[in-house]
Image (cartoon, rainbow, N blue to C red):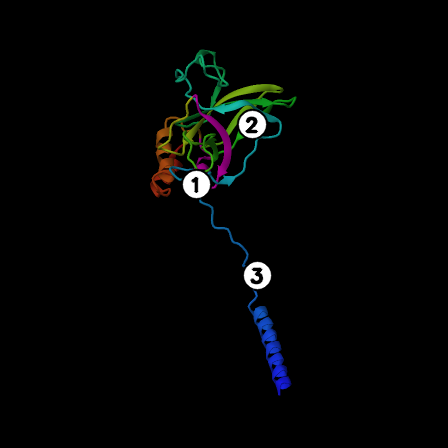
Amino acid sequence: MKRKSYLLFAILIAVGVIYSSCKKQTQSPQPEKPYVPIHQNTLAGLGTHHGFPTGTHYSLPSYVHIIGSIRGGTLGKSADVDKYTYQGTFPIDQEKANYLSYGTGTYINLYIAFYNSLGTNVTLTIPGGLIFCDSLDVVDSLGIYQKGYILQAINIPLPAHDTAFACIRAYCLNHTLAPSSYNAVYYIGPITNNPDLNQISTIMIPKQYPFGSEYNIQSIIWNVTDYGLTLDSASIAYLNSLP
């Protein structure tokens, strides 16, 4: 009798193990669904939005090198730093400066020394839509100085085995931050993928440089970056009306 009880007990244990094994197999985790990235925040780094600007990576041609750093500043005005301690890459005394001005803009001036390593003269094109970022814009901060937005393509002649000194004018993408100054250091960011800024750049491709209309254009840009507005029909009509 005891033997039959032990045998029945053993059979029950075996059935339980098999059932448990089958249950585990049926409850085994299924492969996770493929990760689908969320849409990029095309306002990142613009206005008061934290993060880095999104867009297409841009690199200078391999034969073009930047001498020193990209510095901010104000063309034609006296410097706002101590002449004896300043360590920038261009002269404090404007009458001694040999930087040529390119493009249009408002609060951002970018002083860049481009060296051409080729034995022939070339033309460097800085594309419309390119963003220059404050070097203090690290991690998830907004930095101190306004980011610069290139409205239209800029062509800079580079002599063979020589340096071209360019002051590139740009528009502001952060109304609440400080304008570029002689203490600001910049780096090259992406070509923006913000749809409204892209539309502005596209409209301006065939246009002349809008000298005299810079502050109207700046207001349109701030509407997009700082005031939470889309590019409205009135703004589009104004940009289209420019020669």
Residue 61 location (% of width, % of height): 60, 30
- Of pointers 3 and 1, the one earlier in the residue sequence: 3
Number of labelled discs?
A: 3
Q: Amino acid at mark 1?
A: Ala
Question: Closer to the camera: disc 2 or disc 3?
Answer: 3
- Of pointers 2 and 3, the one earlier in the residue sequence: 3
**As rendered, which of 132 and 127 lies closer to the eye?**
132
Asked which secondary structure carries label 3, the reply is: loop
Please give the residue where the numbered disc 3 appears in the rendered image: 31
Distance from Cα at disc 1 to Cα at disc 2:
28 Å
- Residue 149 placement, left or right of 2: left
Is residue 213 in view?
no
* Dot 1 crowding, Cα within 10 Å, few <14, some 14–19, many 20+: some
Residue at far bottom of view = 1
Residue 168 location (% of width, % of height): 47, 25
Asked which secondary structure carries label 2, the reply is: strand
Please give the residue where the numbered disc 2 appears in the rendered image: 124
Looking at the rendered image, the quarter that the C terminus falls into is top left
Q: Amino acid at mark 3?
A: Pro
Residue 98 location (% of width, % of height): 50, 15
> Is residue 237 part of the magenta span, yes or no?
no
Question: Closer to the camera: disc 3 or disc 1?
Answer: 3
Dot 3 and dot 1 residues touching (CB under 8 Å): no
Dot 1 and dot 2 residues touching (CB under 8 Å): no
Distance from Cα at disc 2 to Cα at disc 3:
50 Å
Q: Amino acid at mark 2?
A: Leu
Asked which secondary structure carries label 1, the reply is: loop
* Stretch of the chain drawn in magenta: 182-207
Q: Is residue 31 above or below residue 49?
A: below
Residue at 56% in and 33% down: 59
Distance from Cα at disc 3 to Cα at disc 1:
33 Å
Please give the residue where the numbered disc 1 appears in the rendered image: 44
